[in-house]
Image (spheres, grey):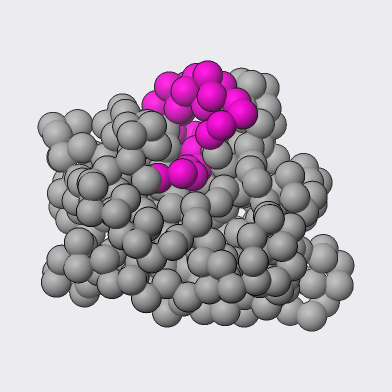
Amino acid sequence: MIQYFKPFTFLCLLFLGINFRAASQETIASKLGYPADAKLLIIHADDLGVSHSENIATFEAIDNGSVNSASVMMPTPWVLEAVNYAKANPETHDFGLHLVLSSEWKNYKWGPVSSTDKVPSLIDEHGYFHEACRSDLNLKEVELELKAQVERAYAMGLEPTHLDTHMGCLAQTTRLTEVYLKIGQKYNLPVFVLDEFLSKEIKETYHPKVLVDQLYTISPEDYSIGPETYYTNTLKNLMPGLSLLLIHTAYDNEEMKGMNVDHPEWGNAWRQKDYDFFTSKTCKELLEKENIKLVTWRQIKEALY
Protein backbone atom coordinates (compact mmCIF):
# COMPACT_ATOMS: atom_id res chain seq x y z
CA MET A 1 0.00 0.00 0.00
CA ILE A 2 1.26 3.48 -0.85
CA GLN A 3 2.08 5.44 2.26
CA TYR A 4 1.59 9.19 2.30
CA PHE A 5 3.55 11.41 4.64
CA LYS A 6 1.26 14.23 5.72
CA PRO A 7 2.84 17.63 6.45
CA PHE A 8 0.62 18.10 9.51
CA THR A 9 2.12 14.99 11.14
CA PHE A 10 5.64 16.15 10.38
CA LEU A 11 5.06 19.67 11.65
CA CYS A 12 3.49 18.42 14.88
CA LEU A 13 6.54 16.25 15.41
CA LEU A 14 8.81 19.20 14.83
CA PHE A 15 6.78 21.32 17.20
CA LEU A 16 7.73 19.07 20.08
CA GLY A 17 11.18 20.66 20.06
CA ILE A 18 13.08 17.40 19.63
CA ASN A 19 16.72 17.38 20.73
CA PHE A 20 19.43 17.13 18.07
CA ARG A 21 22.48 15.34 19.44
CA ALA A 22 25.06 15.17 16.68
CA ALA A 23 26.82 18.36 17.74
CA SER A 24 26.99 19.83 21.21
CA GLN A 25 25.59 23.21 22.15
CA GLU A 26 28.95 24.27 23.57
CA THR A 27 30.83 23.42 20.37
CA ILE A 28 28.41 25.30 18.14
CA ALA A 29 28.13 28.29 20.45
CA SER A 30 31.88 28.58 20.95
CA LYS A 31 32.59 28.28 17.25
CA LEU A 32 30.12 31.08 16.61
CA GLY A 33 31.74 33.22 19.29
CA TYR A 34 29.08 32.93 22.00
CA PRO A 35 29.13 31.57 25.57
CA ALA A 36 27.90 28.02 26.12
CA ASP A 37 24.61 29.15 27.67
CA ALA A 38 23.69 31.60 24.89
CA LYS A 39 20.22 31.48 23.33
CA LEU A 40 20.92 31.26 19.61
CA LEU A 41 18.05 31.43 17.13
CA ILE A 42 17.49 31.13 13.38
CA ILE A 43 14.15 32.67 12.31
CA HIS A 44 13.63 30.87 9.04
CA ALA A 45 11.03 31.61 6.32
CA ASP A 46 10.15 28.70 4.02
CA ASP A 47 8.85 28.62 0.45
CA LEU A 48 10.62 31.47 -1.34
CA GLY A 49 9.79 31.30 -5.04
CA VAL A 50 6.30 29.93 -4.58
CA SER A 51 4.65 33.28 -5.38
CA HIS A 52 5.38 36.99 -5.81
CA SER A 53 3.52 37.68 -2.57
CA GLU A 54 5.61 35.13 -0.68
CA ASN A 55 8.79 36.66 -2.07
CA ILE A 56 8.15 40.33 -1.40
CA ALA A 57 6.73 39.73 2.07
CA THR A 58 9.76 37.65 2.98
CA PHE A 59 12.15 40.25 1.54
CA GLU A 60 10.47 42.88 3.70
CA ALA A 61 10.58 40.63 6.78
CA ILE A 62 14.32 40.12 6.21
CA ASP A 63 15.17 43.74 5.41
CA ASN A 64 13.09 45.43 8.10
CA GLY A 65 11.84 42.67 10.37
CA SER A 66 13.39 39.87 12.42
CA VAL A 67 13.56 37.09 9.82
CA ASN A 68 17.20 36.22 9.16
CA SER A 69 17.08 33.08 7.03
CA ALA A 70 15.01 31.63 4.19
CA SER A 71 15.00 28.79 1.67
CA VAL A 72 14.18 28.76 -2.03
CA MET A 73 12.08 26.22 -3.95
CA MET A 74 13.80 25.82 -7.31
CA PRO A 75 10.85 24.26 -9.25
CA THR A 76 8.41 27.07 -8.39
CA PRO A 77 7.15 29.83 -10.74
CA TRP A 78 8.65 32.85 -8.94
CA VAL A 79 12.08 31.38 -8.24
CA LEU A 80 13.95 33.85 -10.47
CA GLU A 81 12.77 36.80 -8.38
CA ALA A 82 13.98 35.05 -5.22
CA VAL A 83 17.33 34.17 -6.77
CA ASN A 84 17.90 37.72 -8.02
CA TYR A 85 17.20 39.09 -4.55
CA ALA A 86 19.64 36.58 -3.01
CA LYS A 87 22.31 37.46 -5.58
CA ALA A 88 21.89 41.16 -4.76
CA ASN A 89 22.73 40.37 -1.12
CA PRO A 90 25.43 37.68 -1.39
CA GLU A 91 27.32 38.37 1.84
CA THR A 92 24.61 39.45 4.24
CA HIS A 93 21.59 37.27 3.48
CA ASP A 94 21.07 33.62 4.28
CA PHE A 95 19.37 31.51 1.60
CA GLY A 96 19.23 27.73 1.45
CA LEU A 97 17.37 25.35 -0.84
CA HIS A 98 13.99 23.97 0.12
CA LEU A 99 14.27 20.67 -1.76
CA VAL A 100 10.94 19.76 -3.34
CA LEU A 101 9.23 16.44 -4.12
CA SER A 102 5.58 17.47 -3.71
CA SER A 103 3.05 20.04 -4.93
CA GLU A 104 0.35 20.40 -2.30
CA TRP A 105 -2.01 23.16 -3.48
CA LYS A 106 -5.31 22.41 -5.23
CA ASN A 107 -5.03 24.40 -8.47
CA TYR A 108 -1.49 25.77 -8.23
CA LYS A 109 1.17 23.26 -9.18
CA TRP A 110 4.78 22.71 -10.15
CA GLY A 111 6.81 19.78 -11.40
CA PRO A 112 10.40 18.56 -11.45
CA VAL A 113 13.39 20.53 -12.67
CA SER A 114 14.69 17.44 -14.46
CA SER A 115 12.93 16.02 -17.52
CA THR A 116 9.68 14.32 -16.59
CA ASP A 117 10.54 11.26 -18.68
CA LYS A 118 13.52 10.65 -16.38
CA VAL A 119 11.57 10.81 -13.10
CA PRO A 120 8.20 9.08 -13.74
CA SER A 121 7.74 7.92 -10.13
CA LEU A 122 7.90 11.54 -8.92
CA ILE A 123 4.98 12.87 -10.99
CA ASP A 124 1.22 12.50 -11.39
CA GLU A 125 -0.72 12.02 -14.61
CA HIS A 126 -0.36 15.73 -15.46
CA GLY A 127 3.41 15.90 -14.97
CA TYR A 128 3.26 17.67 -11.61
CA PHE A 129 4.79 16.44 -8.37
CA HIS A 130 2.37 14.36 -6.31
CA GLU A 131 0.11 16.29 -3.95
CA ALA A 132 1.55 14.68 -0.81
CA CYS A 133 4.89 13.17 0.14
CA ARG A 134 5.21 9.52 -0.86
CA SER A 135 7.45 6.68 0.24
CA ASP A 136 7.21 4.62 -2.96
CA LEU A 137 9.45 6.86 -5.06
CA ASN A 138 12.33 5.50 -7.13
CA LEU A 139 15.43 6.51 -5.17
CA LYS A 140 17.60 6.96 -8.27
CA GLU A 141 14.98 9.33 -9.64
CA VAL A 142 14.87 11.20 -6.32
CA GLU A 143 18.63 11.66 -6.37
CA LEU A 144 18.55 12.79 -9.99
CA GLU A 145 15.89 15.40 -9.24
CA LEU A 146 17.57 16.72 -6.10
CA LYS A 147 20.84 17.13 -7.97
CA ALA A 148 18.97 18.97 -10.72
CA GLN A 149 17.49 21.39 -8.19
CA VAL A 150 20.86 22.12 -6.60
CA GLU A 151 22.60 22.44 -9.97
CA ARG A 152 19.89 24.80 -11.20
CA ALA A 153 20.51 27.04 -8.19
CA TYR A 154 24.23 27.21 -8.87
CA ALA A 155 23.63 27.74 -12.60
CA MET A 156 21.38 30.72 -11.79
CA GLY A 157 24.06 32.19 -9.53
CA LEU A 158 22.60 31.24 -6.16
CA GLU A 159 25.08 29.74 -3.70
CA PRO A 160 22.93 28.07 -1.01
CA THR A 161 23.94 28.12 2.63
CA HIS A 162 22.12 24.89 3.54
CA LEU A 163 19.54 22.31 2.46
CA ASP A 164 16.14 21.57 3.96
CA THR A 165 13.09 19.60 2.83
CA HIS A 166 9.65 20.82 1.73
CA MET A 167 6.85 19.21 3.77
CA GLY A 168 9.42 16.85 5.29
CA CYS A 169 9.30 14.56 2.25
CA LEU A 170 12.96 13.62 2.55
CA ALA A 171 12.64 12.71 6.22
CA GLN A 172 9.84 10.16 5.90
CA THR A 173 11.97 7.03 5.34
CA THR A 174 15.52 6.01 6.11
CA ARG A 175 16.30 5.48 2.43
CA LEU A 176 15.02 8.90 1.40
CA THR A 177 16.94 10.53 4.24
CA GLU A 178 20.08 8.76 3.04
CA VAL A 179 19.65 10.28 -0.42
CA TYR A 180 19.09 13.68 1.21
CA LEU A 181 22.30 13.43 3.23
CA LYS A 182 24.18 12.20 0.18
CA ILE A 183 23.22 15.40 -1.66
CA GLY A 184 24.42 17.52 1.25
CA GLN A 185 27.70 15.64 1.32
CA LYS A 186 28.18 16.00 -2.44
CA TYR A 187 27.79 19.81 -2.29
CA ASN A 188 29.36 20.26 1.16
CA LEU A 189 26.25 21.88 2.59
CA PRO A 190 24.66 21.63 6.05
CA VAL A 191 21.53 19.49 5.88
CA PHE A 192 18.64 20.05 8.24
CA VAL A 193 17.29 16.69 9.44
CA LEU A 194 15.94 15.21 12.65
CA ASP A 195 18.56 13.21 14.53
CA GLU A 196 15.88 10.70 15.47
CA PHE A 197 15.54 9.70 11.82
CA LEU A 198 19.23 8.85 11.44
CA SER A 199 20.40 5.29 11.95
CA LYS A 200 23.85 4.49 13.30
CA GLU A 201 24.85 3.23 9.84
CA ILE A 202 23.79 6.48 8.14
CA LYS A 203 25.68 8.55 10.68
CA GLU A 204 28.83 6.49 10.18
CA THR A 205 28.53 6.74 6.39
CA TYR A 206 27.63 10.41 5.96
CA HIS A 207 28.80 12.00 9.24
CA PRO A 208 25.99 14.56 9.17
CA LYS A 209 26.48 17.65 11.26
CA VAL A 210 23.06 17.94 12.84
CA LEU A 211 23.28 21.27 14.52
CA VAL A 212 19.92 22.34 15.94
CA ASP A 213 18.98 21.67 19.56
CA GLN A 214 15.32 22.69 19.26
CA LEU A 215 12.93 23.27 16.37
CA TYR A 216 9.67 25.19 16.74
CA THR A 217 6.84 25.71 14.26
CA ILE A 218 3.23 26.65 14.86
CA SER A 219 0.57 23.93 14.57
CA PRO A 220 -3.07 24.41 13.53
CA GLU A 221 -4.11 24.05 17.18
CA ASP A 222 -1.74 26.83 18.25
CA TYR A 223 -2.83 28.96 15.31
CA SER A 224 -6.45 28.69 16.44
CA ILE A 225 -5.46 30.17 19.81
CA GLY A 226 -3.42 32.92 18.20
CA PRO A 227 -0.05 33.14 16.40
CA GLU A 228 1.11 36.10 18.48
CA THR A 229 0.48 34.14 21.67
CA TYR A 230 2.36 31.12 20.35
CA TYR A 231 5.37 33.10 19.10
CA THR A 232 5.53 35.27 22.21
CA ASN A 233 5.54 32.22 24.47
CA THR A 234 8.13 30.49 22.28
CA LEU A 235 10.54 33.41 22.52
CA LYS A 236 9.96 33.89 26.24
CA ASN A 237 10.68 30.21 26.92
CA LEU A 238 13.52 29.68 24.46
CA MET A 239 16.20 27.41 25.91
CA PRO A 240 19.97 27.90 25.67
CA GLY A 241 21.50 26.33 22.59
CA LEU A 242 20.72 26.65 18.91
CA SER A 243 17.02 26.78 18.01
CA LEU A 244 15.25 27.04 14.65
CA LEU A 245 11.90 28.81 14.38
CA LEU A 246 10.23 27.81 11.11
CA ILE A 247 7.66 30.25 9.67
CA HIS A 248 5.96 31.25 6.39
CA THR A 249 5.61 34.90 5.37
CA ALA A 250 3.33 36.24 2.63
CA TYR A 251 0.67 38.89 2.08
CA ASP A 252 -3.00 37.97 2.29
CA ASN A 253 -3.82 39.19 -1.21
CA GLU A 254 -5.65 37.87 -4.28
CA GLU A 255 -2.61 35.99 -5.55
CA MET A 256 -2.26 34.03 -2.31
CA LYS A 257 -6.02 33.48 -2.02
CA GLY A 258 -5.99 31.86 -5.44
CA MET A 259 -2.99 29.75 -4.55
CA ASN A 260 -4.46 28.54 -1.24
CA VAL A 261 -7.99 27.61 -2.36
CA ASP A 262 -9.53 25.05 0.05
CA HIS A 263 -6.31 24.94 2.07
CA PRO A 264 -6.56 27.33 5.06
CA GLU A 265 -3.78 25.68 7.06
CA TRP A 266 -0.49 27.39 6.17
CA GLY A 267 -2.57 29.49 3.76
CA ASN A 268 -2.86 33.18 2.92
CA ALA A 269 -4.28 34.44 6.24
CA TRP A 270 -1.87 32.23 8.20
CA ARG A 271 1.15 33.58 6.30
CA GLN A 272 0.01 37.19 6.70
CA LYS A 273 -0.09 36.70 10.48
CA ASP A 274 3.42 35.23 10.43
CA TYR A 275 4.55 38.29 8.49
CA ASP A 276 2.77 40.64 10.90
CA PHE A 277 4.44 39.21 13.99
CA PHE A 278 7.96 38.93 12.60
CA THR A 279 7.95 42.49 11.28
CA SER A 280 6.53 43.87 14.53
CA LYS A 281 8.12 45.97 17.21
CA THR A 282 6.88 43.38 19.71
CA CYS A 283 9.08 40.70 18.17
CA LYS A 284 12.20 42.88 18.12
CA GLU A 285 11.65 43.93 21.72
CA LEU A 286 11.17 40.31 22.83
CA LEU A 287 14.39 39.22 21.16
CA GLU A 288 16.27 41.99 22.93
CA LYS A 289 14.57 41.48 26.30
CA GLU A 290 15.19 37.71 26.27
CA ASN A 291 18.80 38.23 25.14
CA ILE A 292 18.28 36.03 22.07
CA LYS A 293 21.07 36.14 19.51
CA LEU A 294 20.08 35.69 15.88
CA VAL A 295 22.46 33.49 13.89
CA THR A 296 22.30 32.13 10.34
CA TRP A 297 23.05 28.97 8.41
CA ARG A 298 25.68 31.03 6.60
CA GLN A 299 27.55 31.61 9.86
CA ILE A 300 27.22 27.95 10.76
CA LYS A 301 28.50 26.81 7.36
CA GLU A 302 31.48 29.14 7.57
CA ALA A 303 32.30 28.04 11.11
CA LEU A 304 31.87 24.29 10.79
CA TYR A 305 32.35 23.38 7.11
Quarter-of-image position of residue 114: top right
Q: Give the x, y percent position of residue 5.
A: 45, 68
Q: Is residue 169 visible?
A: no
Badge count: 0
Left/right of residue 3 with respect to residue 66 in the rendered view: right
Q: Give the x, y percent position of residue 296.
A: 57, 48
27 relative to 296, above or below:
below
Q: Give the x, y percent position of residue 268.
A: 19, 45
Foreground of the two, 147 or 18:
18
231 relative to 269, above or below:
below
93 relative to 35, above or below:
above
Left/right of residue 127 with respect to residue 172 in the rendered view: left
86 relative to 302, above or below:
above
Q: Give the x, y percent position of residue 97.
A: 57, 42
133 inside magenta stretch = no
Q: Is residue 20 visible?
A: yes
Left/right of residue 79 with respect to residue 12 in the rendered view: right
Q: Specify start and end residues of the magenta stretch as a single range.
A: 67-93
Q: Residue at x 15, y 66 (%)?
A: 226
Quarter-of-image position of residue 259: top left
Q: Residue at x 19, y 51 (%)?
A: 273
Foreground of the two, 129 or 201:
201
The residue most toward the right is 205
